[in-house]
Amino acid sequence: MDIPAPQGTKLIAIADGTITFRNFLGAGGYTITLSFGNFKVTYCHVDPNFIVDKGELVKQGQIIGYVGPKNVYGVSGNNYKDENGNPTNGATTGPHLHLGFRINDKYVNPLDYF
């Protein structure tokens, strides 16, 4: 699910949980994954200046990151580029949040739950 948002918009934890991934992830660009129970929530195209660490316990409502920039540089293996050939924050044409929601590792529509 894509949510329009300007660069720098705060991203909050939708539930208490553990940060289980924090890195560049191909088409998702810089990504944070929040896990709790059988749920995994991925926040994609985030700012590469991470403010949470893998393994960190976070609380619902806590700021865990920010919407990232369109362009990122110096990422080894990043094959995504904009119309000018500049490297992008994954498969994106501009700043926004791509929210992925999985239950038992199967993607579902986040709007059915939140």
Image (spheres, rainbow, N blue to C red):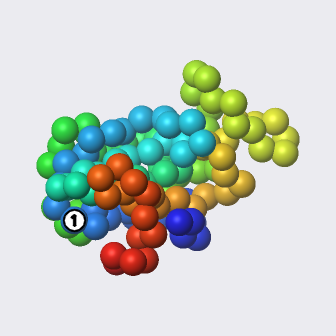
Count of marks overlaid on the render: 1
Q: Quadrant of residue 103?
A: bottom left
Position of 3 relative to 31 (above/below): below
Counting from the top left corner in percent of width and height, residue 12 is at 32, 64
Counting from the top left corner in percent of width and height, residue 86 is at 75, 37
- The residue at the point 70 percent across, 37 percent down is 80
- The residue at the point 28 percent across, 62 percent down is 13
Q: Quadrant of residue 93?
A: bottom right
Question: What is the crowding at mark 1: few (fewer than 14 residues within 10 Å), some, or many (at least 20)?
Answer: some
Of the pair 3 and 109, the residue shown nearer to us: 109
Position of 92 relative to 5 (above/below): above
- The residue at the point 53 percent across, 50 percent down is 45
Q: State the residue position of label 1.
A: 15
Position of 14 relative to 23 (above/below): below
- Quadrant in the picture for the C terminus: bottom left
Counting from the top left corner in percent of width and height, residue 61 is at 23, 69
Inspect the image, locate mark 1, and give the three-letter code of the amino acid beneath it. Ala
Secondary structure at badge 1 equals: loop
